[in-house]
Amino acid sequence: MGVEVNVTKENFESEVLKSDIPVIIDFWAEWCVPCKMIGPVLAEIAEEYKGKLKVAKVNVDEAGELASEYSDISIPTLMLFNKGEMVKPQVGAVSNQVMVAMFIDNL
């Protein structure tokens, strides 16, 4: 499977804001059933777009401050960052097609 990066407040700037490629962030929690549903889809996307797109995971229970700064809404929430800017948010469990549509124009 593709490489997914665990993002915390400490590495958010280097992994997301200063990334050379677009980053899709998954704000999730262990107890969140919809989060677990989209997890395998994100892993497949990480593999398929390896080197073109970074898939980052933010556990809202472990990185609460970061989560509240960017995702003060329900989980799962996906956010696309490109060149240090948040380009597009997507709330809720969505299909592979919706996830790909979020970032394909930014590759």
Image: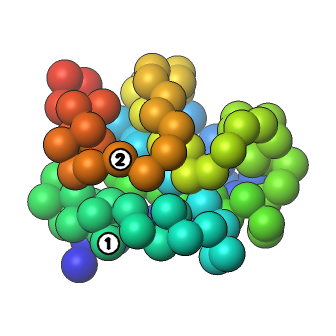
Secondary structure under tag 2 reads loop
Residue 26: image x %, image y %?
A: 51, 53
Residue 5: image x %, image y %?
A: 48, 65
Task: Say what amino acid the circle numbered 1 marks.
Answer: Pro
- Res. 53 in view: no
Residue nearest the observer in this picture, 3 or 79: 79
Tell us which disc is closer to us: 1 or 2.
Answer: 2
Classify residue 14 as left or right of residue 71: left
Residue underneath mark 2: 94
Task: Say what amino acid the circle numbered 2 marks.
Answer: Val
Q: Quadrant of residue 105?
A: top left
For marks 1 and 2, the one nearer the N-term is: 1
Distance from label 1 to label 2 (Cα)? Answer: 12 Å
Q: Residue furthest right?
A: 65
Identify the mark at residue 40; answer none if there is no mark: 1
Q: Residue at x 13, y 60 (%)?
A: 48
Secondary structure under tag 1 reads helix
Q: Quadrant of residue 72?
A: top right
Mark 1 Cα within 10 Å, few/some/many (few <14, many 20+)? few
Q: Residue at x 79, y 68 (%)?
A: 62
Residue 30: image x %, image y %?
A: 64, 76
Identify the mark at residue 99; answer none if there is no mark: none
Q: Residue furthest left?
A: 48
